[in-house]
Amino acid sequence: MIKLPPQPFKVTEVDETHPLVVNALRDRKHFELCWCGSGKKYKKCHRLREQETPCPLGQILSLQQKIFWQKRGCMHPQASPTTCNGRVIDSHTIQRKGPLERIVDETGHVMHFQSNSTDGELGVSKTGWRKASVFPGYCAGHDSSLFSQLEREPFTGEHRQCVLQAFRNVCNELYRKQALIEVLKFQRHLMDRGRNLDEQINTQISYAKSIKGQIKSVEELERLRVSYESAIIQNELETFVSKCYFFRGDLDVVSSSVFQCEFDFVGNKLVDMWDLSIDAESLSHSVMNTDEGGAIVFVWLRSENAPNAVVTSFDNLPDEEKGDIFVQYCFLNCENTFFAERWWKGLSTENRDQVQCFANTFFYEGGEFVSNKDRLVNWSFN
């Protein structure tokens, strides 16, 4: 079965030989640069950090939301004041007039997991379906021109539709990673207020490592975005492979994202994602709607092996287990997952606890996905 870590975050041991620890523990003059790497003078950064009043978590979450969602300009490769039409809009990664429409309740809301302001844990929350799965990525003109085939035509599984949806996922993930780096840089100078020096060091090491990992991920996603843009503009879509799994049943859970292929569905480790010297290979997944139910759509670069291994392991799963296991995979890997209130209320206590646990886990350590006896969804594959 899936191996979940005892703590939601990766824990690594450091000793007093770590460069940041050595730098933090040595005597330092007030006007020297601070040991934390902020670029500020010590006297204006960590000199009196232990005496500072801790910042309430709710206030931090509120401030970081403003940082995360600020508009950063149109992401179109030809974006400019003369080519862009209108302001940057909230682009849907999951179609509003599509999968989201299938899970909306009578009040116009869908459900997802969101951090609460008390302890930062993810809990079930409602959000308006017009605001679900959005990111401020494109001006109105470029959003319409790039993705018109997705928005105006029924999903059939045609390769170009799949590639366009995957491209949208890549842009969304790139925006979120770039925003996350800014949030982490903001957080690292608030989270250790009022803490002793050992706790300050632990906090700064953790954030420094997280920021380094996210910067690496942004570099990889930038290259992937360029590959998509080039293929779409030059109509060389065979650069990518797409595979659709059509199903019949209630479309109660929808998800769309790009993730790095560390393990396949049976727990085989494909790459060590903690080794930043290795470039990640990414796989896009989406849930699209059809008249009879929906489709799980995977897209990846033809030249990469790890995504192909992940999809092959999914293909080898028994058809009667595919839906249940894929939903587990979504909650474990993807924040951009939304579901119907009727579905959530209809889950058994055991299944609800499993979904909650997966949503609160930021990484896992391999192990095979195993379907629930009481299936999470009633999807029937052809």
Image (tube, helix red, strand yellow):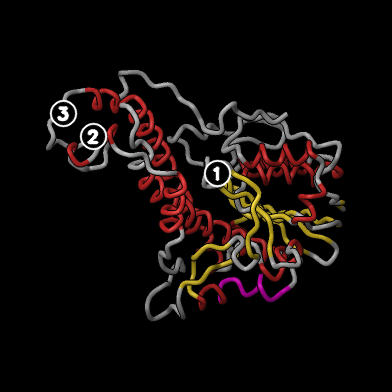
Q: Which mark is residue 119?
A: none
User: Badges 1 and 2: C-beta atoms under 8 Å apart?
Assistant: no
Badge 2 is on which residue? 48
In the picture as drawn, the residue positioned furthest to the top comes out as: 16
Q: Position of residue 169 (x, y in %)?
A: 58, 58
Secondary structure under tag 1 reads: loop
Secondary structure under tag 2 reads: loop
Q: Is residue 82 magenta?
A: no
* Residue type at numbered disc 2: Leu
Q: Position of residue 306 (x, y in %)?
A: 61, 40
Residue at 72% x, 55% y is 339
- N-term mark: 3 or 2: 3
Residue at 52% x, 42% y is 280
Task: Give the magenta-colored segment's residue range.
Answer: 145-153
Q: Is residue 146 magenta?
A: yes
For residue 37, above or below residue 73: above
Q: Which mark is residue 28?
A: 3
CA gap between label 3 and label 2 equals 13 Å
- N-term mark: 1 or 2: 2
